[in-house]
Amino acid sequence: MYKKKDKKPDDAGSRLTSLAELGEFGLIDRLTKNVSHFHPETLKGIGDDAAVIDAGEKVILLSTDLLVEGIHFDLTYMPFRHLGYKAAVVNISDIAAMNGIPTQMTVSLAVSSKFSAEALDELYAGILMACNQYKVDLVGGDTSSNVKGLMISVSIIGVANKEDVVYRNGARSGDLLCVTGDLGSAYVGLLILEREKSVFQVDPNMQPELSGFDYQIGRQLRPEARTDIRNLLLGTGIRPTSMIDISDGLASEILHICKQSGVGCKLFEAKIPIDEHTRELAKEYKIIPSVAALSGGEDYELLFTVKQDDYEKIKDVAGITIIGHMTAPSEGKYMITPDGKSIPITAQGWDGMRGK
Amino acid sequence: MYKKKDKKPDDAGSRLTSLAELGEFGLIDRLTKNVSHFHPETLKGIGDDAAVIDAGEKVILLSTDLLVEGIHFDLTYMPFRHLGYKAAVVNISDIAAMNGIPTQMTVSLAVSSKFSAEALDELYAGILMACNQYKVDLVGGDTSSNVKGLMISVSIIGVANKEDVVYRNGARSGDLLCVTGDLGSAYVGLLILEREKSVFQVDPNMQPELSGFDYQIGRQLRPEARTDIRNLLLGTGIRPTSMIDISDGLASEILHICKQSGVGCKLFEAKIPIDEHTRELAKEYKIIPSVAALSGGEDYELLFTVKQDDYEKIKDVAGITIIGHMTAPSEGKYMITPDGKSIPITAQGWDGMRGK
């Protein structure tokens, strides 16, 4: 999520490596290459939606996510209550992506003196609304002043039976690639909000025109986590072979599964579930609807794979769409367009188009 | 840790409550007053050094701490490697304060583009050095760009037998008040560093004069967590009745134990362990040495209470000092000076003198 900025030479000269050069995932790889574990209870460390820690009967899942003002949210159009809700939900989503049950959460704030206690009351009302909705206990945190702006750091704990945890690395060639809900609306919601913000900046007397875009704006400002999918799949008797939540966009998440599972994939563009109105709006913004789904991110739906044998069980489950299948790694990672063209799936090319 | 700043009227008028008015603990109380728990496994939520979660045989401890540039650290004199080490240690200290064993950690960074990858390499080298020292697995995190500066959010998990966990609320009238190590040196170290910084700001050609202050500067820049105390006390057959780590200063931590245990206390000023050189340096800075201990903070020693019956067991343990005892709540919270005066212990009065 590193923004590309003009590179400035660093104090100690140009031999230093800028963060923009590395990108978020490159930086993480670089910083964590020397990590080693001391505890056999650490079943999974860095590299999935959550760490997995053996706790005897059950495993404990641990994940953490930052939200930084000016990077992840814009208080011009993000109400504090929604922000609190979203900060909680993006973390809850990480536990859902491990097929776990979210249970406890800590919330840390760094906040400049420009914020009032009443604003933070609203933020916490949103956090507690999400805690109530998803039955998560707020158990701690830290508060600090900040030189500028607001930063929210949430850590979350979840629980699961050891055999129920679904990792990113379990997909096999032939597995079906599935996604919950629909994609791209959160990004289109962001475009609408950004448009109204720029109108407002030109003329502060203009009222924002947000009516009629409830779905897209709701997806952006107040996403939900798919904790319901765990039970839905249990009911069908299906255990996903791999799973990840869609925070950075479908393309990026598919590549994570491919990389960690050591497989290739074939994604069918025509199968990507996109809300009809979102599709129309994307076109108004001169964006190919599938690009909004592939690269927009923040939909917080789940992407997962199931064994081909589970086709009959999953094909008619409402709210789940089969969008492709995994292949041998040598077959590459491709999206097939409706007219039969194969386009390599890449997450890098999209960085430029993203508003964050 | 909210700094007192000039109050500016908020956008929506003066009826809004500034954060400075509330202070950190007032703000936390206000924001978390509506928190309720859904999981019986949540044995302890907000209000101790760590949350305590039942995990069957063992309990899981969870804590989190933020370090914000310009608030908690100053990169003028804080090397990145020390900063990483300290960010890990302050969290490890929270688990030690629960009488637990730290096991896993996540590290999240928000970092502006002015930082190089090499600087973050150093930061992580420090984090991993602490992980190695204290046998903690780094299992995850998040990285984000930041509009300005550096922010580090660490969350830590620890483990303990249920019956071994020591809370803040277990002190009883008559219990002995004990502290590990010595206090005030981290604060005096900060004063030395701030002095050299101001000399440097006046004349950037001046070399900082830091030799001879190794202990004080080391305590400030590279503190250690007292994870050794758990085994030390086990060896003596003593189980503390309450415990907390000293991050904000002795006075503040004593008041936390008194409040949560519902007791008063008598602290003997002459008993507070202070390094001899630190004592001299404090006087040079025109600070009463005990004030550096009471209000300086960042020593990361442990403050704990033991039953009076344990006096014989604890009185000669090297590195542990009995500094007072707990009283009935009606007797108040007092420090007794060497000439027999009783001074109310207060954490608020010191805010003004603190450099952070």
Image (spheres, coloured by chain):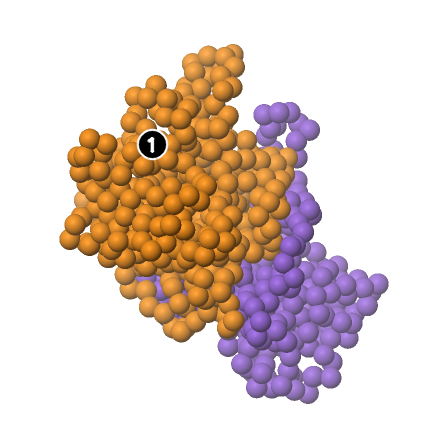
Chain colours: A orange, B purple
Question: Of the residues shown, which amino acid type is indicated by label 1?
Answer: Ala
Instruction: Give the chain letter at badge 1.
Output: A
Near mark 1 (Cα within 10 A), the count class, few <14, some 14-19 or many ≥20, is many
Q: Residue furthest front?
A: A312
Taking the view exactly as shown, the residue that stands out farthest to the left is A330
Q: Quadrant of residue A251?
A: top left
Residue nearest the viewer, comparing A313 with B185: A313
Which residue is at the far right? Answer: B330
Residue at image point 78% right, 72% down:
B173
The total of numbered circles placed on residues is 1
* Residue A327: % across, % down: 22, 52
**For the residue labelled by badge 1, is the local secondary structure a helix, a strand or a loop?**
helix
Give the percent coordinates (x, y) of residue A65.
44, 48
Residue A47 visible in rendering = no
Residue at point 35%, 64% (across, down) = B128
The residue drawn where x is 34% and y is 43% is: A322
Image point (35%, 50%), residue name? A311
Q: Position of residue B212 (x, y in %)?
A: 40, 67
Q: Is residue A342 visible?
A: yes
Instruction: Return the residue nearer the eye: B108 or A170.
Output: A170
Q: Nearer the viewer, residue B246 or A28?
A: A28
Q: Find disc 1 in the rendering and name its residue.
A: A292
Residue B351 position in % (x across, y down): 62, 49
Q: Give the left or right position of residue B83, taking residue B118 as reference.
A: right
Asked where in the image residue A193 lies, by quadrant, the reply is top left
Q: Is residue B4 above or below residue B40?
A: above
- Is B225 rendered above or below residue A49? below
